[in-house]
Amino acid sequence: MLPFLYPFLNTTVRARPAVSRLQKAVRCCRWQSSSPPEEPESEFLHTNPPPSDYSRFIFQDKCLVTVVAGSGGDGCVSFLREKYIEEGPANGGDGGSGGNIFIQAIDGLSSLHKLARQGVIRAGRGKNGQGKSQGGKRGHDVLIQVPVGTVLREVSRFDPVEEKEHEYRTLRGAMPEDQVDAEADPAQRGRFVLYPGSKPSDFLLMSFPSLGPPQRPSIAALEPAAPIHLDLSKNMPEPIVLAAGAVGGFGNPHFVSRSTPKPTFATKGEKGMTLHLEFELKLLADVGLVGFPNAGKSTLLRSLTNSRTRVGNWEFTTLSPNIGTVVLDNGKGRPLVESSDRENPRTGFTIADIPGLVEDAHLDRGLGLGFLRHIERAGILGFVVDLSAGNPIETLQKLWHELGEYDKMRDIKPEIHSEDYLVSWSPEPAGQTEPFVNDASRPTKKLPPLALPPIYRKPWFVVATKADLPETQEKFIALRDYLSQVQQGTVQHPSGHKDAFRERVVAVPVSAIKAEGVQGIPNLVMTFLEDRKTAS
Ligand SMILES: Nc1nc2c(ncn2[C@@H]2O[C@H](COP(=O)(O)OP(=O)(O)OP(=O)(O)O)[C@@H](O)[C@H]2O)c(=O)[nH]1
Ligand SMILES: [Mg+2]
């Protein structure tokens, strides 16, 4: 409304200008938001992104973690005190049991960095028992969540209950149970707690009853067999017990007998066990991309998926694995790629892009071969070969050579438990003693190796990238001819193995940066995935 009209309006109407100015401002904002000023047209594509389009991802695939199960609380020594009852019966509560440690592999996690940062994970200690027959509170449980694909190995363990059991067995020897008591076994005295007002000398004067072997909670039966070696390769709907908390001590009413009507002692809670564990993450993807640095693996991943992995025209742009999902339906349940399983069609598959390999990576050149562990479980291998750099056939052969070296290294990986329990210490002159072996922490059996098929048996294909660059066509034709010879068996398989996969070996020419030619890859991968499904 124009201001010159205000003198002609009545008072109620005159109160409106503030509102109308506000409305105007709001309208103005709405106008601005509904039609934003035009931005200069971006020259960046999803496959050739600006630096702001990179996702930052903290990745850790190996860590050593110590887990400590909760110790039990002590039993309580207490007697009923009430008006007119000066010396009532014993009413000390039992100690609470220690917290358990659980483990669960879940989808949606992709790194062990949070776990590695914790270093030591402790479950809660059970609270001590209280007077008036009040039992102590249980220690809090701890749940360790890890990504699917985590392999867990026990490095060492210290189980105080096992040690006590061992002590109990050796000290008692062949003596019958009813002939021994705490007098004959001084170690047993350490398992008791006395009345709060007692002196240290009471310990020596008091006679204690015989205690059986140390107890374990019933949940300990669910612990994995020692030494722990778990391969958590599937999403777990429920967690499993890794280390059970120790039991709490008994309150003094447990020791009331005809000879000791007023026991002034209770028992201590057991100590929780300590496990040193090695966590190793082996990412799970359907397709693993292998190639030299700067070959265009990350660009290919970006062109096939919504991944925001970093791309750059220098070597080792990618420093940690990335996983992208290729969506095979149009978001409304209509498949973009035909699947033979009509009832349960696949809606997508995953692709892993790992840092580039270099020649002699097995000699620890470049980033080494460590990242290959993330594709060793991939069902299919995709070799990414840069058509503009060197001879693609030689590149492919070199990549296979490195994979072969990795396969060999996998088989001769030193067992973590092989010799680290031997301590070469001898009080006697050399040659007369045997090395001391720490029996308590020595695992009883050798770790079984992970059953993974050799890499050369996996289905594979070649993605020949940068096909948009000049003088790449002849190189592609040479590569295609070589692969058809591999398929027919007229030349040696690039892995050097006779029984390697050579049924359907193809090369797909693409320009990943322009997202041209990549459309055929989902179809190709699907045929391999379905072949595997029918074979298994
Ligand atoms: N002309 C052309 N350039 C490409 C193509 N694919 C990738 N590039 C370029 O090649 C360079 C390397 O691409 P990346 O995807 O980062 O290569 P990478 O294999 O992931 O490299 P690392 O992570 O170091 O192993 C980038 O500058 C890309 O833009 C392509 O199809 N055509
Ligand atoms: Mg990369």
Image: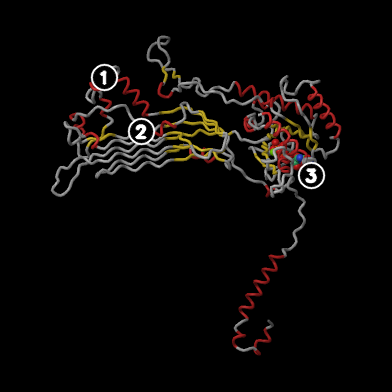
Q: Amino acid at mark 2?
A: Lys
Residue neighbourhood size for the residue with mark 1, other residues' Cα within 10 Å, grouped as few (<14), some (14–19), many (≥20): few
Q: Is residue 251 above or below residue 391?
A: below
Q: Is residue 490 above or below residue 115?
A: above
Q: Amino acid at mark 3?
A: Lys
Instruction: Indicate the quadrant where residue 22 lies.
Output: bottom right
Residue neighbourhood size for the residue with mark 2, other residues' Cα within 10 Å, grouped as few (<14), some (14–19), many (≥20): many
Q: Is residue 428 above or below residue 82?
A: above
Residue visible at 80% across and 23% down in the picture: 488
Q: Amino acid at mark 1?
A: Pro
Q: Secondary structure at mark 3?
A: helix
Say which label, 3 or 2, has the lower sequence index: 2
Tag of residue 176: 1
Tag of residue 514: 3
Percent x, y of residue 433: 40, 12
Cβ of disc 3 within 8 Å of ligand 1? yes
Percent x, y of residue 266: 25, 35
Q: Is residue 429 above or below residue 452?
A: above
What residue is shown with label 2? 271
Q: Quadrant of the N terminus?
A: bottom right
Residue visible at 66% across and 23% down in the picture: 405
Percent x, y of residue 71: 36, 36
Q: Secondary structure at mark 2?
A: loop
Asked if residue 254 shows in the view, the reply is yes
Q: Residue furthest front?
A: 343
Q: Nearer the viewer, mark 3 or mark 1?
A: 1
Q: Quadrant of the C terminus?
A: top right
